[in-house]
Amino acid sequence: MKMTQVTKPHEVKREWILIDAEGKTFGRILTQVASVLRGKHKPSFTPNVDCGDYVVIINAEKAIFKGANKMNDKEYFTHSGYFGSTKSKKLSEMLENQTEKLYKLAVRGMLPKTTLGREMLKKLKVYVGPEHPHTAQINKEA
């Protein structure tokens, strides 16, 4: 009788994947990144184990956004918990000033809302320019 093999946390082999965002659609990049962070691209995927790979995104500010006025219409809200403390930023402001936070917010919505999802999000590295300090670890380019 054949049994399904369940991956244990110590058996997971992690790789580093480099993604260049220049000229690619923002949402398409992020769905690919979420899948790799979760580990769904591996045949040994197990939902309750963090079996994903590390992802490095370079040229993050050069991604393409589809939609006529998305840069001016889309807003991101923050709230500290106090009355009247709601603040909003437009997508264009977030892309200029907080590019890494913008990418992490978008990917976080595609990952599980548990401690496992928070651990997966820590494996995402986002850089505005083409330079990054992970050249020694990079195995593949996507």
Image (cartoon, rainbow, N blue to C red):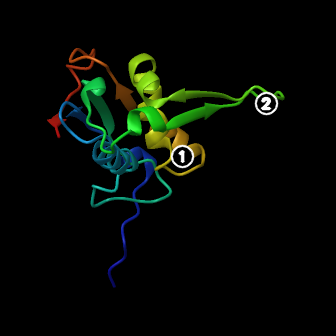
Query: Quadrant where the C terminus lies?
Result: top left
Q: Which mark is residue 81?
A: 2
Q: Kindly identify the amino acid type of the residue bearing the numbered disc 2.
A: Gly
Q: x%, y% of residue 40?
A: 34, 56
* Sequence order check, earlier mark of 2 and 1: 2
> What residue appears at the point 45 percent right and 47 percent down from the top-left corner?
50
**3D distance between C-alphas at marks 2 and 1:** 25 Å
Q: x%, y% of residue 27?
A: 33, 45
Q: State left or right for residue 127 relative to residue 93.
A: left
Residue at the disc numbered 1: 116
Q: Is residue 91 above or below residue 113?
A: above
Q: Which mark is residue 13?
A: none
Query: Quadrant where the N terminus lies?
Result: bottom left
Near-viewer residue (111 or 25): 25
> What residue appears at the point 55 percent right and 34 percent down from the top-left corner?
76
Near-viewer residue (25 or 130): 25
> What residue appears at the point 36 percent right and 59 percent down from the top-left corner?
45
Which secondary structure lies at badge 1?
A: helix
Q: x%, y% of residue 32?
A: 29, 48
Q: State left or right for residue 93 relative to residue 13.
A: right
Which secondary structure lies at badge 2?
A: loop
Q: Are marks 2 and 1 in contact (CB under 8 Å)?
A: no
Q: Kindly identify the amino acid type of the residue bearing the numbered disc 1.
A: Leu
* Quarter of the image where one finds residue 20: top left
